[in-house]
Amino acid sequence: MSSEVQSHRDLVVWQQAIDLAVAVYQVTKNWPKDELYGLTAQARRAATSVAANIAEGYGRENRGSYQQFLRIAQGSLKELETHLTIAQRIGIARDDAIAPTLERSESVGKLLRLLIRKLSGQ
């Protein structure tokens, strides 16, 4: 199998972002029902936005646009981390559920930064 990237689906960062979104859906499924349209929806939206922006940027086939969408994905990642931290602090999410999700988020963030640097020629 070739290691050449032929699609956004071949990007490890996109694959990990998908895994992160799935993890967020699993973590949030037992959050209180009164948060369904609040923190739950915001966390899920931010998580799916990360992978979606990686894919959309890749599809633009323009380096500058691609980098911009990767930066938007970084912003969504920070938004997600904020929602998870708030949920943890107000007691709707357990530390043992949030910690691995935040670790996944950190891993995706590192990969995003590496990809942006690579595209910048740094």
Image (cartoon, rainbow, N blue to C red):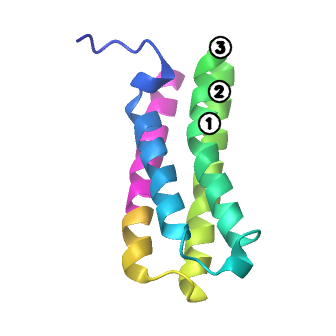
Label at residue 56: 2
Q: Residue at x 56, y 39 (%)?
A: 51
Q: Position of residue 29 (x, y in %)?
A: 55, 68
Is 23 one of the magenta-colored residues? no
Q: Which residue is mark 3?
A: 62
In the picture, measured across the screen, residue 45 lies left or right of residue 6, that is right
Per the rendered image, the range of residues in magenta is 103-122
Whether residues under marks 2 and 1 lie with C-beta atoms below 8 angstroms apart, the answer is yes
Secondary element at image label 3: loop
Secondary element at image label 1: helix
Tag 1: amino acid: Ala
Assess disc 2: are there few (<14), some (14-19) or many (≥20) residues with their C-alpha within 10 Å of its C-alpha. Answer: some
Q: Which residue is mark 1?
A: 52
Q: CA distance from mark 3 to mark 1?
A: 17 Å
Whether residues under marks 3 and 1 lie with C-beta atoms below 8 angstroms apart, the answer is no
Magenta stretch prevailing secondary structure? helix
Relative to 10, is 40 above or below? below
Is 117 one of the magenta-colored residues? yes
